Image (cartoon, coloured by chain):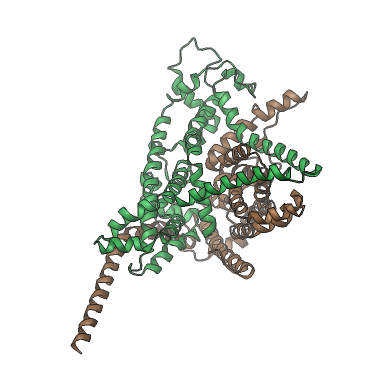
C-alpha cells in the first residue's frame, strides 16, 4: 500500500518538474533531426508489431460472423460482410464441445485453487525454523525445477499410477510447483517477524497463523500465482495428448486441435446438420473453416476477457521473479 | 546447584516441545512432499525401461532385460544414427537461431521505452504480451487461418499481385527453422520484453538527466546508459537459454509438424515423443536419460560461468 502511494507522489512531482522545465528552459530535448527520425521510425515499427499481434485475432473473428461462402473463398480480409451469428449457434450444438468446456473449466478451477493454497502453505512452512529437517524438504522440492525424467518415462510411470483416463492426471502432477513456492517463501520472509511472534504469544498455532496472519498479507503474490496457474491449466495440452483417450475427459485445447484437421471439423458439421433447416443458404452453412475458426474464438475468449483485468498482477509477478532469479 | 538444574530442565523441556512441534509441522507438509516424490521423482524410476526391450501390452517382468543395447543402438544402428543426427541438427538450429536473436526482446524494450506517448506505449505493451497467454494449439489454429491457401496472407497477396498462385505456407519444407523462430517470437517477445522494461525503469533518472544536460543525443543515452544498465539481465537470460539448449519443448513443434516439414521440424523433445508411435519406448527412454544428464551438466556449467563473471549464480 505505502509503496503505491510513494510512486504516485513521485509521479506527480515528476510531472510538475517537467512543466517547470518546459516553462523555463524551452524544449526538454535537444531535438536534432536524427532524434526526430528515430521517433518516426520507432512509431512505425511498433504500430507494425501491434498490428501483427492483434490482426490474426481480428481476422478470425470477422470471418466467424461473415458470410461463410465468402469466408471460405478467403474474401474476408479487413471488414466483415453480411454479418450473421449462425456459426456460434451451431458451434454450441457440436457434440462434446460444451462438455470439453466443462472439463477445461473444472481443471482450471480445481488446479488453480490447489496450486495457490499449496504454494502459500509450503512457502510459509519453509520459513519456519521449527520445521523438522526444513532445509532438506525445501531442497527436495526445489530440485525438481532442474531435472525432468523425459516424456516417455513420465508417461509409463503415470500409467503405473493409474493416471490414464483419470481426471486427477490434470491436477496432481501440476499442483506442487517449486517456482511458486520459492516466490511465496521470498514474500513471506518479507513479512515482519513480530506479527507472527505476537500471534504465537497469544496462543495461535501454526495453521492459525498461516490462515489469519500470512495469507492476508501475501495476497498480491497469490493473485499473480493464481493467474499463471489458471492460464497454464487452461492452455495445457500435452497431458491430454499423452494420457487421455476417453472423449469424456477431452479438454477444449485438445478438441480444437482435432478440429484443425479438416476431417474432424466435417464430422462435427454432420453431427449438427440435422438441426439446420433446408432453407439455409450457402452463406450460413457450416464449413470446415467456419467450425475451426468459431471454435478458436470460443477457446481464446476466456483468456482475452481476463487478460486486461489481471495485467497489473503479472507485471508485478515477473518483477519479483526477476529479482529472485 | 538446584536452581541451575531447574533452568536446564526448563530449557530441555522447551527444546523438546519445539522438536515435537517441528515434527507435527512436518506432518502438515508430508502430503505435499509425497506428491512431489510420486509425480516428480518416481518418473525417474521409469528410466529402468531403457534397459529392457519394452513393448506395451506386456509388463516389465515379461520382457527381456537387454542391458545397454539401446545406448549402443544410438551409435551403431545406421538408420537410428541418421535420425538422431538429423534431430540434433534441428535442435541446434532452433536453439541456435533463438540465441542469435536473443537480443530482440531487449532492443524491443529499449525503443519502446523511447516512446513518450504513454497510452500508445501501454497499448503496444498490452497487445504484444497477449500472445504469450494463448496455447500452442491456438497459435497453430491462428497460423492455419492466416497462412492457409485461402487465408489472409494468400488472399491479400493475390489481390495485390496479378497471377499470384496461392501457397500453402504450413505444408512447406522451406525455411522451417526460421518460420518456427518467427512463431516463437510472435508468442514470447512481448512477454520477454517486460523483464527488460522493469530493468529500465530501475535506472537512476539523474544519470539520464545529467547526460541530457551535457547534450547527449537519444542514441548516445541508449548506448552509454540504458544498454549497459540492462546487460546483466540479458546475460542471465542468455545463460539460462544456454542451459536449456537441448530443451525446446515438444508442443510447438508437435502442433506444427506435418509430413512435409518433419525432416526439419523434429527436435529432440519431439523425436522422443514420436518414437512412442513406433513402439520405441525403450530407445526413447535411453535418449531421455542422456539428455537429462547433459542438460544438468550444462546447467551446472552455465551457473559456474555466471558465478565467475557476475559473482553470483542463478540456481
Residue B232 at least partly seen: yes
Res. B164 image quadrant: top right
Percent of width and height locating residue B105: 65, 49
Q: Can you name the residue that lies furthest to the top here?
A: A279
- Residue B131, above or below B16: above
Question: Is B123 in front, or is A12?
Answer: A12
Percent of width and height locating residue A261: 54, 33
Q: Can you name the residue that lies furthest to the right here?
A: A33
Percent of width and height locating residue B68: 53, 65
Q: Is residue B257 left or right of residue A232?
A: right
Res. A20 image quadrant: top right
Question: Is B289 in front, or is A226?
Answer: A226
Q: Is residue A325 left or right of residue A191?
A: right
Q: Can you name the residue that lies furthest to the left here?
A: B2
Question: In this structure image, what is the colour of chain A?
Answer: green
Q: Identify which residue is drawn at 24% across, 62% down.
A: A203
Percent of width and height locating residue B176: 67, 43
Q: Identify which residue is drawn at 68% across, 30% down.
A: B153
Question: Is A109 in front, or is A243?
Answer: A109
- Residue A313, above or below A144: above
Q: Can you name the residue that lies furthest to the front here?
A: A24
Q: Identify which residue is drawn at 20% across, 82% down.
A: B6
Question: In this structure image, what is the colour of chain B?
Answer: brown
Residue B278 at least partly seen: no
Q: Is residue A164 left or right of residue B186?
A: left
Amino acid at each position: 500500500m505505502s509503496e503505491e502511494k510513494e510512486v504516485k507522489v513521485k509521479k506527480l512531482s515528476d510531472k510538475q518538474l517537467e512543466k517547470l522545465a518546459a516553462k523555463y528552459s524551452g524544449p526538454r530535448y535537444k531535438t536534432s533531426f536524427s532524434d526526430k527520425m528515430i521517433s518516426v521510425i520507432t512509431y512505425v515499427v511498433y504500430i507494425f508489431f501491434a498490428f501483427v499481434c492483434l490482426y490474426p485475432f481480428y481476422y478470425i473473428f470477422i470471418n466467424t460472423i461473415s458470410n461463410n461462402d465468402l469466408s471460405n473463398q478467403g474474401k474476408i480480409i479487413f471488414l466483415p460482410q453480411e454479418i450473421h451469428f449462425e456459426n456460434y449457434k451451431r458451434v454450441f450444438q457440436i457434440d462434446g464441445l460444451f462438455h470439453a468446456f466443462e472439463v477445461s473449466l473444472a481443471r482450471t478451477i480445481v488446479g488453480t485453487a490447489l496450486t495457490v493454497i499449496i504454494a502459500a502453505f509450503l512457502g510459509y512452512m519453509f520459513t519456519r525454523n521449527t520445521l523438522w529437517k526444513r532445509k532438506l524438504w525445501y531442497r527436495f522440492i526445489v530440485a525438481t525445477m532442474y531435472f525432468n525424467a523425459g516424456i516417455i518415462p513420465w508417461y509409463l510411470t503415470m500409467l503405473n499410477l493409474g493416471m490414464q483416463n483419470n481426471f486427477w492426471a490434470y491436477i496432481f502432477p501440476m499442483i506442487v510447483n517449486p517456482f511458486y513456492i520459492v516466490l511465496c517463501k521470498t514474500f513471506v520472509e518479507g513479512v515482519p517477524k513480530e506479527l507472527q511472534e505476537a500471534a504465537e504469544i497469544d496462543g495461535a498455532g501454526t495453521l492459525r497463523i498461516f490462515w489469519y496472519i500470512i495469507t492476508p498479507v501475501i495476497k498480491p503474490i497469490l493473485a499473480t500465482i493464481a493467474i499463471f496457474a489458471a492460464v497454464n491449466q487452461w492452455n495445457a495440452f500435452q497431458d491430454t495428448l499423452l494420457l487421455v483417450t476417453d472423449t469424456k475427459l477431452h479438454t477444449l485445447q485438445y478438441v480444437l486441435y482435432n478440429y484443425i484437421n479438416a476431417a474432424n471439423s466435417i464430422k462435427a458439421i454432420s453431427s449438427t446438420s440435422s438441426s439446420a433447416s433446408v432453407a439455409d443458404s450457402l452463406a450460413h452453412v457450416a464449413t470446415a473453416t467456419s467450425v475451426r475458426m468459431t471454435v478458436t474464438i470460443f477457446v481464446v475468449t476466456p483468456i482475452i476477457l481476463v487478460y486486461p483485468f489481471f495485467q497489473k498482477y503479472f507485471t508485478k509477478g515477473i518483477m519479483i521473479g526477476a529479482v529472485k532469479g | 546447584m538446584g536452581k541451575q538444574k531447574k533452568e536446564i530442565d526448563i530449557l530441555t523441556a522447551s527444546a523438546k516441545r519445539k522438536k515435537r512441534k517441528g515434527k507435527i509441522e512436518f506432518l502438515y507438509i508430508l502430503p505435499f512432499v509425497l506428491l512431489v516424490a510420486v509425480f516428480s521423482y518416481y518418473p525417474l524410476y521409469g528410466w529402468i525401461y531403457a534397459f529392457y526391450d519394452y513393448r506395451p501390452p506386456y509388463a516389465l517382468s515379461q520382457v527381456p532385460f537387454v542391458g545397454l543395447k539401446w545406448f549402443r543402438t544410438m551409435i551403431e544402428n545406421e538408420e537410428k544414427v541418421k535420425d538422431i543426427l538429423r534431430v540434433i541438427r534441428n535442435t541446434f538450429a532452433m536453439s541456435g537461431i533463438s540465441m542469435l536473436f536473443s537480443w530482440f526482446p531487449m532492443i524491443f524494450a529499449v525503443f519502446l521505452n523511447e516512446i513518450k506517448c504513454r497510452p500508445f506505449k501501454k497499448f503496444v505493451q498490452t497487445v504484444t504480451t497477449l500472445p504469450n497467454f494463448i496455447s500452442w494449439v491456438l497459435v497453430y489454429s491462428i497460423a492455419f487461418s492466416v497462412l492457409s491457401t485461402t487465408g489472409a496472407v494468400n488472399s491479400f497477396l493475390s489481390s495485390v499481385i496479378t497471377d499470384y498462385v496461392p501457397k500453402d505456407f504450413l505444408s512447406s519444407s522451406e525455411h522451417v527453422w526460421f518460420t518456427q523462430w518467427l512463431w516463437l517470437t510472435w508468442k514470447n517477445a512481448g512477454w520477454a520484453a517486460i523483464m527488460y522494461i522493469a530493468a529500465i525503469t530501475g535506472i537512476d533518472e539523474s544519470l539520464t538527466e545529467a547526460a541530457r544536460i551535457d547534450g547527449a543525443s537519444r542514441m548516445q543515452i541508449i548506448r552509454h546508459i540504458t544498454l549497459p544498465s540492462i546487460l546483466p539481465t540479458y546475460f542471465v537470460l542468455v545463460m539460462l537459454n544456454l542451459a536449456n539448449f537441448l530443451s525446446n519443448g515438444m508442443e510447438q513443434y508437435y502442433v506444427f509438424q506435418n509430413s512435409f516439414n518433419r525432416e526439419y521440424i523434429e527436435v529432440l523433445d519431439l523425436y522422443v515423443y514420436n518414437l512412442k508411435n513406433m513402439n520405441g519406448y525403450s530407445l526413447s527412454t535411453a535418449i531421455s536419460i542422456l539428455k537429462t544428464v547433459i542438460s544438468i551438466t550444462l546447467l551446472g556449467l552455465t551457473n559456474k560461468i555466471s558465478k565467475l563473471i557476475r559473482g553470483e549464480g542463478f540456481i
